[in-house]
Amino acid sequence: MMPIKALTLLGEIFVLRRPRDPVTPPSKQWIHENFHWPTSSESLMSSGWALAIFAILIGFLIALKLFLWYRKKDRPTGPMIIFYQICKQVGLSLQSQWLLIRIAKQQSLSTPLTLLVCHATLSSHAQAYAQSLPVTRRGDVLMQVVGIQYKLFGK
């Protein structure tokens, strides 16, 4: 039975023509003839449609999870955001920022922000980092650290 026809029939059942004229309720036979009642052997929805809806729902949830993961993986964590902002304010080049990150990783620091705290901290960690490099590169790295110290601390 079409839903529009069912609504029309329901409308005919409950309409009062005049306030004092009672409407007789429909008989059981009339209801069974005009409305389809599922029996115990019939299901309300076929299993094919249920599987299709379930598959669409699972696909949507997987796509949402992938989107949120992709958006999160490109963002740096809180301390790194602060590190990048400070470097930008001071005017450090990307090469200098990368050197500070390499020093922090080699020295097992939790964040390169530690190097920006004090002149002595940056000097000691840079010296230890330079000792792990080949002799030919030590001088260049230490000169670059001196330039970073000058921009950060004015020394």
Image (cartoon, helix red, strand yellow):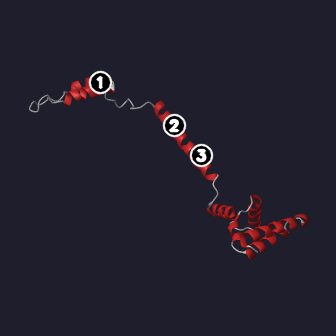
Q: Measure the C-alpha gap from mark 2 to mark 3.
A: 15 Å
Q: Residue at image x 48%, y 35%?
A: 53
Pick the front one: 83 or 42: 83
Q: Mark 2 highlights which residue?
A: 56
What percent of the width, then of the height, locates residue 62?
56, 43
35 relative to 131, above or below: above
Residue placed furthest toward the bottom:
120
125 relative to 93, above or below: below
Q: Residue at image x 77%, y 59%?
A: 95
59 sits left or right of 23 in the view: right
What percent of the width, then of the height, locates residue 104?
74, 66
How crowded pointer 1 is (Cα within 10 Å; few <14, some 14-19, many 20+) is rated as few
- Figure quadrant of the N terminus: top left
The mark nearer the N terminus, 1 or 2, is: 1
68 relative to 21, above or below: below
Q: Marks 2 and 3: CB-CB under 8 Å?
A: no
Q: Residue at image x 17%, y 30%?
A: 25
Q: Mark 3 highlights which residue?
A: 66
Q: Mark 1 highlights which residue?
A: 5
Q: Amino acid at mark 2?
A: Ile
Q: Amino acid at mark 1?
A: Lys
Q: Secondary structure at mark 1?
A: helix
Q: Residue 69 shows which numbered tag? A: none
What percent of the width, then of the height, locates residue 7?
28, 28
- Figure quadrant of the C terminus: bottom right
Q: Measure the C-alpha gap from mark 1 to mark 3.
A: 45 Å
Q: Amino acid at mark 3?
A: Leu
